[in-house]
Image (cartoon, rainbow, N blue to C red):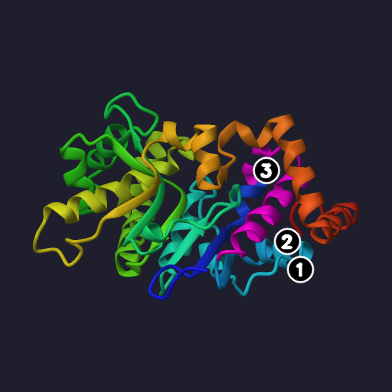
Amino acid sequence: MSAPGGVRRAVWSFWSRPFQARHHQVWASPKHHLLAWILSVETARQHYAETALVADEPGAALLVDGLGLPFGEVSTALEALGEADADWWVLGKLYAYRAQSEPFVHLDSDVFLWKPLPEELHRAPVLAQNTEQFPFVGSWYRPETFDAAVRAVEGWLPPEWAWYVAQRSGEALCCGILGGADVGFIRHYADGAIRLIEHPANQPAWRAIGSKVGDNILFEQYYLSACLAYHAQHEGSSFHGVYARCLFGSAAEAFTPDRAREAGYTHLIGGAKRNEALAQRLEARVARDYPQQYQRCLRYLASGAGGLP
């Protein structure tokens, strides 16, 4: 377990509407989606004294009532998202970040912790998976496109965003894991990202851009780096001393098998979720290490509840 003063709380989030609308397609099958949840929760809870789920009611029904995952605390705070646009799937994570009041680490459900995270991460103001570097123009992040779209409609941009884009910065933080000891900063960042997405003045910009499913990381990962860099440069800020520490130094390092094995960390990012060989290994691992949970998953699927209630 983490030492006193560090992160002792692991958090997951599940907003069911984006999953129903689109994200179920990224998994090899409904079974493998549920098996990943089992493995993520069971591996991480070996290292954390507290576990929590932030979900909406259908999401909690699936994971707690259906699958029986043993979270220490369950919140249905994501019911507050109501009929929010499900293309903004990152809102579920951002609302969960903002809801935290003590040091925590949020894990994506496709992240498996075979070993505890290093203590230097647990004690850092902000912790994340790895840094990502990319060209400011012409990258998959598209900060210049979104910035121009908001300015064209005279929308709202937070000072951190405006300053970071003016620097033409091309760095983000991958949030397969995201958390830290400075929950005040994390809540400030999450609130700004949520406001960027939800601000009424920005809605014409989002409509003009069209599909934004692939751009959610801009508001979670790029804006996080913007907040860190902005407050580091502004000595009068109450967040001036905040910094981030990453498990890996780069995306390339994070996905180097030997380095990931050394760290005891797996993240089934992108197409890995549909990889047949990895799906077979996932099922074999859960069946071997967590046989009761595996059998409950199979019974739940056999009942016809393969997705969401």
Q: Position of residue 152 (x, y in %)?
A: 24, 38
Helix, strand or loop at label 1? It is helix
Secondary structure mostly seen in magenta is helix
Q: Which residue is mark 3?
A: 24
Separation of residues labelled 3 and 1 (CA atoms): 19 Å
Identify the residue at horizontal 76%, vertical 68% (top origin).
65
* Residue 116 included in the magenta stretch of the image: no
Label 2 is placed on what type of residue?
A: Leu
Please give left or right for residue 203 compared with residue 265 in the image.
left
Label whose residue precedes the other's in the sequence (3 or 2): 3
Q: Position of residue 289 (x, y in %)?
A: 77, 54
Please say whether residue 157 is visible from this viewpoint. no
* Magenta segment boundaries in residue numbering: 21-47
Separation of residues labelled 1 and 2 (CA atoms): 6 Å
Q: Which residue is mark 1?
A: 65
Q: Which residue is mark 2?
A: 62
Separation of residues labelled 3 and 2 (CA atoms): 13 Å
Q: Please say if the residues under marks 1 and 2 sit with CB atoms less than 8 Å apart.
A: yes
